[in-house]
Amino acid sequence: MLGNLDAGGKEERYKLIEQAANPRQVTDLCQLFGVSRSGYYAYLKRKGNDRDAEAKRLLRTVYKRYEGKYGYRQLQLFLWQDDGVWMNHKKVLRLMQKLGLQAGIRRKRRFNMTYQAGERVAENLLKRDFTAEQPNQKWVTDVTQYRVGERWLYLSAVKDLFNNEIVAYQLGERNDNELVLQTFAKAFAKQKDVTGLVVHSDQGFQYTSHAYHDMLPKVGAQISMSRRGNCLDNASMESFFSHLKTEGLYPYDIRNLAEAQRRIKKYIRFYNRRRPQRKLNNKLTPIEYRRQFAA
């Protein structure tokens, strides 16, 4: 019946599609009503309508939802995760440019970490292979620092390379062995069987200490270390710290250590549970990826 309608009938069908459609439905509705997508968009153009109006609205919404921090590639993932809309990354970029939406400026702050002479050094078992086929196969770890006024806050964290999840972390005002040992105590309390696990770090004094080298073999883990002064050997951990600071700390006017601690804890929860990653099946969060593997 639809096929017998004249040009005037097509206009009516275009109107029905316009009223019902969102960016995900146009193709299906055009097929249902027996009209072409090009004809429908030509109809919108004749009316002076913006064919991307709904897509722009969605982009504005997700951009504001995440406080204008993210660029087009991460917004593409958030659109899929939050709204079920998979939009080509080139289209996301084009529409963001039209709307004047830009990612928050990444302010890179570099601090010189002071290392004491190490007691024990291990071979680099990881060799920059930041992939793992299952949980608890490869972990990376490091300590970073954040300054609030004249005080410093230190974060020790452990990341599983299988799904990039932060397995455990510890905050403190002192960068010492205890900070690292407490981090691993938390990690091993959550992950009971870590036999054969490779734990990779740099050659910081905490990781070359006797306490660290005594602890890991007791649970069946192997110690791996970056070459001296080569941060690329632990690039995956450095990447997480960069995201934490540029997305979770630098955008805010943090005035005390308590607020900094709160921001860090909030970001790690967000990173594990809400921030989709392109490498995890192109759209999953670390915890979603782990659950999918276990299912």
Image (cartoon, rainbow, N blue to C red):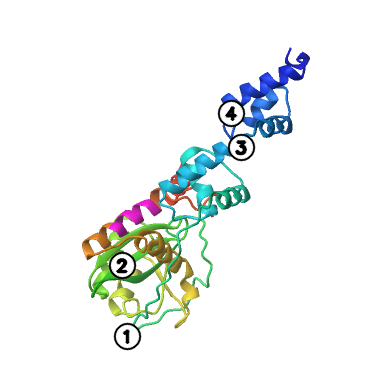
Judged from the image, the secondary structure of the residue bearing numbered disc 2 is strand
Q: Which mark is residue 21?
A: 4
Q: CA distance from mark 3 to mark 1?
A: 62 Å
Q: CA distance from mark 4 to mark 1?
A: 63 Å
Whether residue 159 appears in magenta in the rendering, the answer is no
Judged from the image, the secondary structure of the residue bearing numbered disc 3 is loop
Residue type of the residue flagged with mark 1: Gln
Q: CA distance from mark 3 to mark 4?
A: 13 Å
Residue at the spot of label 2: 155
Question: Residue at 39% across / 48% down in the picture?
Answer: 273
Residue at the spot of label 3: 50
Where does residue 255 sit, x and y in percent of width and height? Answer: 24, 64
Say which of marks 3 and 4 sits in front. Answer: 3
Q: How many marks?
A: 4
* The N terminus: image quadrant: top right
How packed is label 3: few (under 14 Cα within 10 Å), some, or many (20 or more)? Answer: few
Q: Which quadrant holds residue 271?
A: bottom left
Judged from the image, the secondary structure of the residue bearing numbered disc 1 is loop
In the foreground, 228 or 80: 80
Q: Which residues are magenta?
A: 263-271
